[in-house]
Image (cartoon, coloured by chain):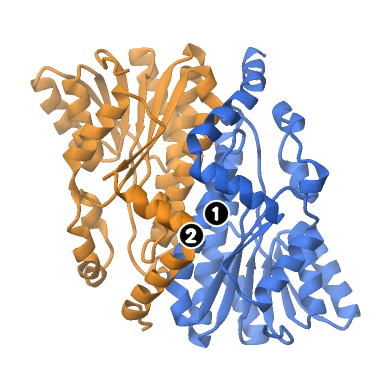
Chain colours: A blue, B orange
Amino acid sequence: MVSLTGKVVIITGASSGFGAAAAKLFSQEGCKVVLAARRMERLEEMADEIRRQGGTALPVSTDVTEFEQVQALVHSTMDEYGCIDVLFNNAGFGRLDWFEALDPVRDVQMQLKVDLLGVVWMARSVLPHMYKQRSGHIINMCSLAGWAAPPLYTVYSAAKFGVRGFSEALRRETRPLGVEVSTVYPGSSSTEFQEHVGGNQAKKRFTTPKWLKVTPEEVAQGVVSLAKRPRRSLILPRIMGLSIFFNSHFPGISDRIQARLFAPYHMKSMGE
Amino acid sequence: MAHSLHGKVVLITGASSGFGEDAARLFATEGCKVVLAARRLEKLQVLAAEIQEQGGEAIAVPVDVSQSAGIEVMVQSVLDLYGQIDILFNNAGFGAVDWFENLEPERHIETLIRVNLIGTMLVTRAVLPEMLDRGSGHIINMASVAGLIASPLISTYSASKYGVRAFTDSLRREVAPLGIRVSGIYPGPAETEFGTHLNQQRTREKINRFIDLRMTSGYVARRVVDLAKRPRRSLVIPWWFRIITTFDTLFPVVVDWILYYFARKNHTLE
């Protein structure tokens, strides 16, 4: 178990949800937190709040789909603090709908850029510094959708599977050189994520029961515990590991169950 | 049950070389109307001429799957000509093989994801509505064993192919009840231009021992045509790669340790 006091932590998507919750917890652990997101006013407010409580925070307006801005974020962190100990690659959103109802530009290209390309670019920009330090920890925010690809999740699952594949490959490269890579796989939670998924009828019908949901605070605690004691992955809630196992090892049955569950809704939407 | 492919309209992306080129010839031999799509129009025209000479039917359409606007225009032109697309073979893609810190942010990360993953989705997005209207069609996505197991040196390629796998699985679960088949193909190393596009001579030599296992591109293409005749959810070629990927799913930590050893021996920082 390592102490996090004085560590420099970059958090993308820090303006809400898991990112905001993690920022609070990391600063309570004594970390210097770099808050990155597009909404600068929110970041300023959060930074003020953290400073009032005696912490250190640096807000940086960042759009992870622009490589120059990703690099600028890393540069300002290095200028301010001189090193990067933890990257919490958290920015992302999801649009969940039948594939033919998704918009090619906004829902396909944009989603992939934020959820996958942004994650890879952040890691690419941070890694040379971590290699120089011979230490560092990249924590990628994935999702249970990084393990199973149900209907409505065509694009979101593609992005999150991509994050999982990327994280696995990256860990296998970097760990012998002292850089840790972990992946977090949370299930459904109540964050701003839910406001952006869209209004699909089947999605409204199949909501996650309360006992299977995780709170942003639980996820943030999981992320901080990963930073203290690096592990390869964290599934939240743990019980969902069972559904992942089933989906991975019985793909044919999973296909039939899921296709049958969603088919009536899809046919109805086609009729409209 | 195997069905005849005679008279089917097959759209193949990345048809100018590799699996796409060989699959185009084979589909034409089966009596399909083959639509060859890729960036290199001259190469496509040569291939189309060759297929026509042998009594087949083929047309060449230029497209860059990393550009969304061009894709819709291309698919519309095919629909105007043939009225429908029976089989879509999403084959366009390339690889980048190097340690992650050596990969270029634009070419080896952004363009790779745009071509391999976003391109596959956008072409499918353009073709799917017409298939849904008819309630039939077959979408075949070219993934890779790298979409089942993530390994050092191919971090971004694995990311793109994991993505193709998820897209394939999710889409199948959406559209199978509506009469549309969706299959994923997961070939291991094969003999295509892919190998010549590898970035670094040095790295290439290092993995040459592994690459020597490679299959011919024609063999993979034959399996693709078989898959079109007899649709299945997925196809891993050679089949025994399934053993390795299942082992990775069950015991990822063991695979980690093996690959850490590989990385420790070969990965040096400059």
Q: Looking at the rendering, which quadrant does residue A181 occupy? A: bottom right
Q: State left or right for residue A42 relative to residue B77.
A: right
What residue lies at 49% left-to-right and 38% top-to-bottom?
A251
Q: What quarter of the picture does the C terminus of chain B occupy?
A: bottom left
Q: Quadrant of the N terminus of chain B?
A: top left
Task: Report whether B26 appears left or right of B81.
Answer: left
Of B169 and A30, nearer the camera is B169
- Residue annotated with mark 2: A166
Horizontal and vertical percent for residue A171?
Answer: 48, 69
Residue B210 can be seen, yes or no: yes
Whole-angstrom CA distance, mark 1 to mark 2, is 9 Å
| Element type at mark 1 | helix
Query: Which residue is label 1 attached to?
Result: A116
Q: Amino acid at mark 1?
A: Leu
Q: Is residue B16 visible?
A: no
Q: What residue is shown at x 54% (from left), y 56% (from top)? A: A163
Is A126 placed above or below B62 here?
A: below
Query: From what the image shows, is residue A26 above or below residue B46?
Result: below
> Is label 2 in a helix, a strand or a loop?
helix
> How busy is the neighbourhood of tag 2: few (under 14 within 10 Å), some, or many (20 plus)?
many
- Subunit that carries the residue with mark 1: A
State if disc 2 and disc 1 touch (CB < 8 Å). yes
Quadrant in the picture for residue A103: top right
